[in-house]
Amino acid sequence: MNPKRLPSLSWLVLTALGLLPLSNLKAQQGAKSSIYHMGWIDFNKNGKMDVFEDPAQAVDKRVEDLLSQMNLSEKSCQMATLYGYRRILKDSQPTPEWHNEIWKDGIANIDENLNNVPNHTGKHTSFGYPHSVHATSMNNVQRWFVEDTRLGIPVDFTNEGIHGLCSDGATPFPAPISIGSTWDKPLVHMAGDVVGREAKALGYTNVYAPILDPSRDPRWGRVVETYGESPFLIASLGTEMVKGIQQNGVASTLKHFAVYSVPKGGRDGEVRTDPHVAPKEMHEIFLYPFRKVIENAHPLGVMSSYNDWDGEPITGSHYFLTTLLRQQFGFKGYVVSDSKAVEFLYEKHHVAHDFEDATREAVEAGLNVWTNFNQPKYYINNVRNLVKAGKLDIATVNDRVRDVLRVKFELGLFDQPYVADPAAADQIVQNKQADSIALALNQESIVLLKNKANLLPLKTGQYKKILVTGALATDGSYATSRYGPNNNKVTTVLEGIQQFIQNQHVGTEVSYTLGAKVLSHDWPKSELIASQPDADEKAAIEKAVQAAKKSDVIIAVLGENNKTVGEGYSRSSLGLPGKQLDLLRALKGTGKPIVLVLITGQPLTINWPNENIPAIMTAGFPGPQGGTAIAEALFGAYNPGGRLSMTWPKSVGQIQFNFPFKNGSQLDQNGPHKKEGYGHSRVNGPLYPFGYGLSYTSFKYNDLQISPEDKHTQGNIHVTCKVTNSGSVAGDEVVQLYLKDLYSSVTTYNSVLRGFQRVHLKSGETKTVSFELVPDDLSLINRDMHRVVEPGDFEIRIGSSSEDIRLKQTITVNE
């Protein structure tokens, strides 16, 4: 069915398509059926085709016609979110009592309706699964707004989707920090397509994804939900995610605008204030991903954050929500507040007297839609009271509502407000193609950090007894988060290893013992004061040691779970939590070879393991297929090729220590042991630099070609090089292009990432990799806060990480 046309259908046909449950057929017959006509819907039920109901009219004309018919009650209802079933909405399906609720005049959006929110007991419903039932149930809710409100304005159904759609049984991806480690733009585009396609099939029309916040402080709990620290990497992957989602006729809403990801001290929870960010840094680091994604992918939504910047709360800031977002960046969608961001204007920031005053500030600043885990009537009544009291101009309200309506028209909600074929959802959601993309994301996100003496890949016939230890070998809780799919079967690391060995038919014995839990008995006090394991912890470690002595190789699966990293879970230290390091030290004493597999949502200061354990790989926070992907990488069925999207420091004392960085700001300190990583009084250098990752093969770079070598400020630069797999097995190389401005009018970054490609090469194979630099790639913010390209010399660097540069050449930019 053409989504832009809804032909005249009898109610029996509508029922057959799943647009009406059979039980509702008689109740819906009669007057309501008369609103559906050949090619249009009579939303306002006046018996004629109005301009806003005519699909042939331009969107702006349709918006203005509908706006002209709306009263204040209806306009204010288009400025608020209703949280879905069992969060705020108490009914899973429409009831007669809805005619007494404030949404009898409509609502802007309903968030997370019927999605069976993970990790929230008491929130599950039989309407969330099977997928066809879910889609039909969403249609029923939408139908109520179309048929039972005066103007019939459809709802925008929003939902989370940062690593797969947050719905029961949707396709689960690894966490965003793992997606960032893939450095694979085409794969991320396919992942976005899966999210958008599944959202569309289930009745969601707007996905809150991607998160574009750069993670500059690894202690921050929500690092796991970001793509990393580099604004260019984030913008590149974010652009592909948005395009993938929106190609399905579903809106993408960017999170969290802006300067959200560096609360003071990396603190989370109720803090989220006072980011110490200079103006140029704000534009070059924290605003850059939003600007580039808006310019290149045209997302239809942006979520405003609850923090301030330089004393100016974002959600009450005309500068951020209007001057920057709309006038400078060209955003054309609608802005929704993060939950409670408006209330924080008076509760936390104290720039408003009360909730009503905060409402006025937010609306005047440019906020379109309020969101909180509260009844929408409180905010909606604020808007109505402010207008009636002359404290809020109705013209401003019109502007905010205009943006919301425009998005709904662009999504086709006024042409086809329903899921056209609910039954198809059972074949669309988490099908084989989507599962293969999810597996590829898990595989490509694995980063090999160390491989002394080529211990990896493990040869299945060489080791007769393999010991797997660590709580994270059997605990798969990391695979399900508040913002992703739920109720999916998780293949743990132990299960992945057991299944792989079983399929090899080599007679290898795989045993397991706990060794150490993720959290110790004295967590989080142990972050500050080292303590000895208690009796139970000693016994678990000793049991692992005895098992290790009887084994040929040890696979220690250690790191973090969703109680140490995530929203509200910032760290004071970045070491292995609990007594996991005690376990690792004890295992080292057995003399047996050890492979350390890290499950982690943020960089860890694993200095002792880096010096003492021969092989280390990190899988980030994998999805439910993570155990399969890890096993394949351990035994060589897959050659890991991921790259770190964040710098791993040696100590929290080095923070902030990340890429990109200003000239001289992260230089080594002179001292007697500088080459060993120590200065007179400080530790030098990263543990692992940005862009770092090893492989089971090796790669050679040559034949750097740049055209032109001398250019004008507004011209493009074409860069190519050749990369050869010089090893014995096939593998992926991430070719990275960095740019260094040699001389400029302001202090710039030592170098910035300006291109990357992940390429697969067979043994001995050579490929030519091409990049196109545009003027914006060479630009800077000058002393007058203008973005310009300054004439001068630039060095183009190509390599395998930010520190492993293989080729470089200087070019000159002329006036």
Image: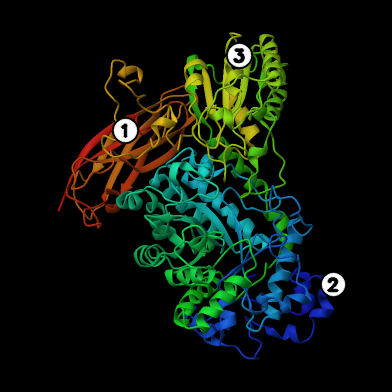
Instruction: Check the image and report above or below for 116 versus 446.
Output: below
Residue bearing the label numbered 3: 586
Labels 3 and 2: the sequence-earlier one: 2
* Quadrant assignment for the N terminus: bottom right
Inter-mark Cα distance, 2 to 1: 68 Å
**Horizontal placement of 653 versus 557: left or right?**
left
Which structural element holds mark 2?
Answer: helix
Please give left or right for residue 371 compared with residue 714 in the image.
right
> Dots 3 and 2: beta carbons under 8 Å?
no
Q: Residues within 10 Å of mark 3 (few under 14, many from 20)?
A: some
The amino acid on which the numbered mark 3 sits, given as a three-letter code, is Ala
Residue 104, quarter of picture = bottom right
Q: Mark 1: few, some, or many residues within 10 Å (few <14, many ≥20)?
A: some
Q: Nearer the viewer, residue 309 or 412?
A: 309
In the depicted view, which residue is nearer to us: 279 or 759?
279
Report the residue marked by disc 1.
Answer: 666
Q: Is residue 809 above or below residue 132?
A: above
**Type of the residue with mark 2:** Ser
Which residue corresponds to mark 2?
A: 23
Of the residues under marks 1 and 3, which one precedes in the sequence? 3
Outermost residue on the bottom side: it is: 47
Secondary structure beneath label 3: helix
